[in-house]
Amino acid sequence: MSTDPTRFSKGERLLPFSTLLETVGEPPDTPVFINRARESFELLMHAHDFIEICMVTEGSGVHYIGPDRLSVSRGDLFFIPVGITHVFRPKSAAKGRPLLMYNCTLPAAHIGKLLQALPAAAGGAQIADALLQLNETGQWLHIRDRNEEGQHLFHRLHDEFTARKPGYTASLCAATIELLVLVYRRWLEAAPQLRTSEETPQRQRQASQTLQPSASMQHIIEQIDADCTAELHVADMAAKLGISERHFQRGFKKATGKTFLDYVQSARIDLSCKLLLRGDDKISDIAARAGYADMKFFHELFKKKTGVTPRQYRLSPN
């Protein structure tokens, strides 16, 4: 996003959302800020205190987001949470097709206000919860426009924001809701197991009840805590959130302070400790119940995590 390249050329944090509105004379209660920008090499990596939904409308280049580097071209659309560092760069500084972007920015709280104001049957609260969880866990999305649906929506938003015809704020709200629904749908398409059913109202209610936890990193953690001996694989967990394995690993460590493997192993050793103190089952049986068939590995891991062997742990005073 490029509102004032000179202001941000040193890589400072972007201006607050309210200040963006002030630069174009919009009242402070305007729900969204829309602009169309030509990306350059002046703006450095930056973060912001609002959610940004942006889309490449012309040209090609590179999107540096967090530690990742992604080639982008017309139709690439991103959902970028608060606090995620990123910057777009055109393909070349030489003359050629510029890298043009549409940007829709809004405070995270406005997502809930827009979508939760819809009738309950419309499912707005469910969509808001899912998108806000992405924001809270720092999970950015990269999706592709299809049939230029996103292009048309952004064009409409930009026209309303710049022309300011009577009732334009209401029209901005309506078009922003459509954009949020578009992001939500494309995200579900990238993770089919999260897709809600349209077969019956009952199936819709069942899906809405299970979707929100499935979309949460916190729920993944709770699943591990509840059943740490299940088959747990990073690829499956990442698919549940509709993100890459690498992005999942970063988000998981940010949420727990541990890698996925270390967290699972710690949970299984914690379970082993409880089982050791509960009864007189054989240590080999307890290891198996905790998910370990290799006794040598189990003993080594147990001592690494607790400082003592399973037998010493069982005999220790509690």
Image (cartoon, helix red, strand yellow):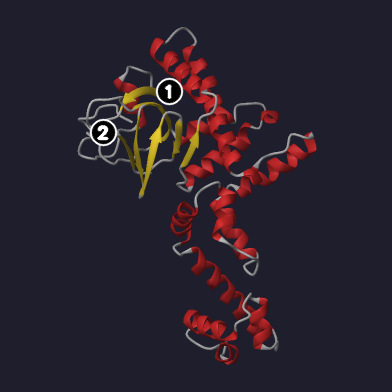
> Label 2 crowding class (10 Å Cα cut-off): few <14, some 14-19, many 20+?
some
Query: Looking at the picture, does residue 46 appear above or below residue 137?
Result: above
> Label 1 crowding class (10 Å Cα cut-off): few <14, some 14-19, many 20+?
few
Residue 199, horizontal then vertical, whole percent:
78, 35
Residue 249, horizontal then vertical, whole percent:
47, 57
Query: Looking at the picture, does residue 175 appear above or below residue 239?
Result: above
Inspect this view and state whether residue 50 appears: no
What residue is drawn where x is 66% and y is 32%?
Answer: 123
Q: Which disc is residue 29 wearing?
A: 1
Q: Which disc is residue 4 wearing?
A: none
Q: Quadrant of residue 284?
A: bottom right
Pick the residue in front: 97 or 82: 97
Pick the residue in front: 125 or 53: 53
Q: Which disc is residue 92 wearing?
A: 2
**Which residue, as the protein is rendered here, is positioned at the far top?**
166
Q: What amino acid is at disc 1? A: Asp
Q: How many marks?
A: 2
User: Which callout, 1 or 2, points to the residue nearer the camera?
Assistant: 2
Secondary structure found at label 2? loop
Q: What amino acid is at disc 2? A: Ser
